[in-house]
Amino acid sequence: MLAFRRGGAFACAVNFSDAPIPLGLLGFDGAPLLASESLTDGVLAPDIAVWIA
């Protein structure tokens, strides 16, 4: 998992692990703006990136 925040309004997370990760565990406020694949039930599946604003 690689996750970072840029300022107070933008965040990015990439799940490099083999396990899905609930977005709520990332601690970022905001809603997904863009994802490299569809998000299901607020979970970041393996090998997917999400941008949050």
Image (cartoon, rainbow, N blue to C red):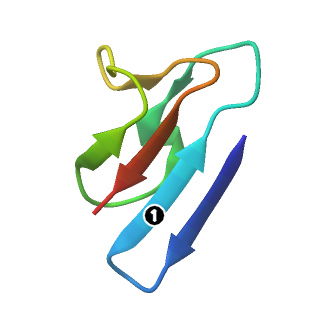
Q: In what element is the residue under mark 1? A: strand
Q: Where is residue 29 in the image (x, y as percent from the top left)?
A: 32, 61
Q: Nearer the viewer, residue 48 or 18?
A: 48
6 in relation to 10, above or below:
below
Residue at image location 34% in from the left, 22% down from the top:
39
Residue at image location 32% in from the left, 77% down from the top:
9
Q: In which quarter of the image is the N terminus?
A: top right
Q: In this view, does 47 lie to the left or right of 8?
A: right
Report the residue marked by disc 1: 11
21 in relation to 19, above or below:
below
Residue at image location 59% in from the left, 16% down from the top:
20
What is the three-letter code of the residue carrying label 1? Ala
Q: How many numbered badges does the structure rendering display? A: 1
Q: Which of 35 and 25 is in front in this view?
A: 35
Residue at image location 42% in from the left, 58% down from the top:
28
Q: In this view, does 32 lie to the left or right of 51?
A: left
Packing grade of label 1 (10 A; few <14, some 14-19, many >=20) is many
